[in-house]
Image (spheres, coloured by chain):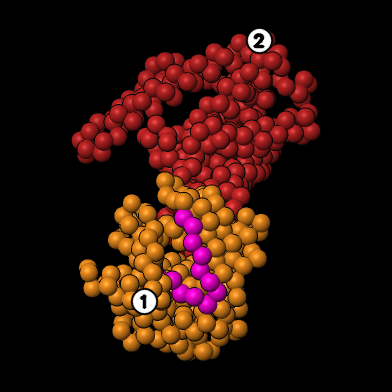
């Protein structure tokens, strides 16, 4: 049950950011496009130069090799990348992929031999989630995980991600532009102002009023 | 038999062919006229100058002079490699990667060839050292420039994919494996192709020159085979060193892709 602890995180001209997400807790992150939400996730994954301390339970980002840290924090980027011809080649061991995760994402084992070039945006997104979970991350940083999905898929993916968080007691940081989605998936929310300043918008009822106010 | 001397009039006649091509370029609006003129003038001036330099050098064969000329050639090649990059690594290190790798490969191989293979007395005799180094540097320069350009350009285009691979926990080395391989292959292709067709389609300039100068064809051929192998090794080792150098600069110790080290050509201010 490792909590994600961010302390005095600074990158570029942003920060310092300090917050904590408990194991099994899902925190929403919203704010205008270009406010720097994706940048914040990248910095937590140590993909951009930064200062400050990042901890996931006993794991200290600066004490371990960066690839190990990134595998532990599991960032799902808004646009997924694919570099081989076939879907299956992007998994370390496709045979070991969890059938339930595949099914929840709307696929079966035959997806292994599908051509990347023929995937739709939504299929790529759902497969990117299966690929990320196959890595067994201890925490999830989700950058608009359902942005390109239809209603039915959105519900299934939300369940898949929340179930993963609950069973692994993983902290989740969920970026979304959809207030209704954040109402569904998280209790606590962070709002990023266009200046990059992060405001906690508290519990469930507070969020509801924020959502109505806009 | 000695070489049939060429008069300035003979050269002017050859130049008139280029002039004719320039007129064609103007007629067809190819926009090559200016470049053609500059390149022709550079060829003439640079070769006349090196002719004078070599004449002096041959008369006073001192190792210090040979070294000085070699360094001038190396620096010129290093400048040329930087000039051929569209996205170049900023600062001194960008220049150092290209120049350093050419120095390592071309100089080592030239010295090896002079000392061990050709075994002339003295080994630094400029009649051997300078042309040999020139041929090695010229070809290594093309390979290094091509390989570095391919590496930086592909990394730039595939940055999303590289960062995705890093996010999944791959090391920088794993994330650029295919790109690095492609860049080294691209750098090696011209010399491999030219080794495959030499003698069949093309007769290399050095061999032609030796035959014109009165050497027997077999002697000239032996030298050409030697040169081909040296060039191939020089290009391969030089380009690989340069591409690994580029890779080291493109990633930091935390396995982050640092595209901020790249500057687009023309952006002289840096950052």
Query: Does the magenta portion include B122?
Result: no
Secondary structure beneath disc 1? helix
Q: Position of residue A158 (x, y in %)?
A: 41, 82
Quarter that holds the C terminus of chain B: top left
Q: Nearer the viewer, residue A211 or B13?
A: A211
Specify the label residue B59 is tagged with.
2
Q: Nearer the viewer, residue A103 or B248?
A: A103
Q: Position of residue B158 (x, y in %)?
A: 45, 58
Asked if residue B23 is positioned above or below residue B256 in the image, the reply reads above
Residue found at x 42% / y 15%: B8
- Colour applied to chain A: orange
State the predominant SS element of the stretch in magenta. strand
Q: Nearer the viewer, residue B19 or A166?
A: A166
Answer with the quarter of the image where residue A36 lies. bottom left
How far apart marks 2 and 1 lie (CA) works out to: 91 Å
- Colour applied to chain B: red
Asked if residue A194 is positioned above or below residue B236 in the image, the reply reads below
Q: Is residue B120 left or right of residue A180?
A: right
Would residue A43 be seen by someone viewing this image from the given angle? no
Query: Does the magenta portion include A24?
Result: yes
Answer with the quarter of the image where residue B166 lies. bottom right
Would residue A99 be seen by someone viewing this image from the given angle? yes
Quarter that holds the N terminus of chain B: top right
The magenta stretch is A17-28
Q: Position of residue A69 (x, y in %)?
A: 60, 63
Q: Chain of mark 1?
A: A
Asked if residue A140 is positioned above or below residue A167 in the image, the reply reads above
Q: Position of residue B250 (x, y in %)?
A: 53, 47
Instruction: Provide the residue designation for mark 1.
Output: A204
Residue found at x 41% / y 82%: A157
């Amino acid at each position: 049950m490792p909590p994600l602890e961010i302390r005095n995180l600074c990158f570029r001209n942003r920060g310092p950011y300090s917050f904590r997400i408990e194991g099994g807790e899902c925190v929403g992150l919203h704010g205008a496009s270009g406010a720097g939400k994706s940048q914040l996730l990248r910095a937590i994954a140590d993909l951009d130069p930064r200062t400050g301390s990042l901890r996931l339970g006993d794991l200290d980002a600066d004490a371990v090799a960066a690839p190990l840290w990134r595998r532990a924090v599991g960032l799902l980027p808004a646009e997924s990348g694919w570099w081989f011809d076939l879907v299956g080649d992007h998994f370390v061991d496709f045979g070991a992929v969890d059938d339930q995760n595949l099914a929840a994402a709307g696929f079966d084992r035959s997806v292994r031999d599908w051509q990347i070039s023929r995937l739709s945006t939504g299929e790529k997104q759902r497969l990117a989630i299966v690929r990320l979970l196959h890595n067994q991350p201890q925490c999830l940083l989700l950058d608009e995980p359902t942005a390109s999905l239809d209603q039915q898929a959105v519900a299934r993916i939300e369940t898949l991600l929340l179930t993963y968080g609950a069973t692994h007691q993983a902290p989740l940081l969920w970026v979304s532009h959809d207030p209704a989605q954040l109402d569904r998936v998280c209790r606590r929310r962070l709002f990023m102002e266009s200046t990059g300043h992060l405001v906690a918008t508290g519990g469930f009822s507070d969020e509801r009023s924020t959502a109505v106010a806009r | 038999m000695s070489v049939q001397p060429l008069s300035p009039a003979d050269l002017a006649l050859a130049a008139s062919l280029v002039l004719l091509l320039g007129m064609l370029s103007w007629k067809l609006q190819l926009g090559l006229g200016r470049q053609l003129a500059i390149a022709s003038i550079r060829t003439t001036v640079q070769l006349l100058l090196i002719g004078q330099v070599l004449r002096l050098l041959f008369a006073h064969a001192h190792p210090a002079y040979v070294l000085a000329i070699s360094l001038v050639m190396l620096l010129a090649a290093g400048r040329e490699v930087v000039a051929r990059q569209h996205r170049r690594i900023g600062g001194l290190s960008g220049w150092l990667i290209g120049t350093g790798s050419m120095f390592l490969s071309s100089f080592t191989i030239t010295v090896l060839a002079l000392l061990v293979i050709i075994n002339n007395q003295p080994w630094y005799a400029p009649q051997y050292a300078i042309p040999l180094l020139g041929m090695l540097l010229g070809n290594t320069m093309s390979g290094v420039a091509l390989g570095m350009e391919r590496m930086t350009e592909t990394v730039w285009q595939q940055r999303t994919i590289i960062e995705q691979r890093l996010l999944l926990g791959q090391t920088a080395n794993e994330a650029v494996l295919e790109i690095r391989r492609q860049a080294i292959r691209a750098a090696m292709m011209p010399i491999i192709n030219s080794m495959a067709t030499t003698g069949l389609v093309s007769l290399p300039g050095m061999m032609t020159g030796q035959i014109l100068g009165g050497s027997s064809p077999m002697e000239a051929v032996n030298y050409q085979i030697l040169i081909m192998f040296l060039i191939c090794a020089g290009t391969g080792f030089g380009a690989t060193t340069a591409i690994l150098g580029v890779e080291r600069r493109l990633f930091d110790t935390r396995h982050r892709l640092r595209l901020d080290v790249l500057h687009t050509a023309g952006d002289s201010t840096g950052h």
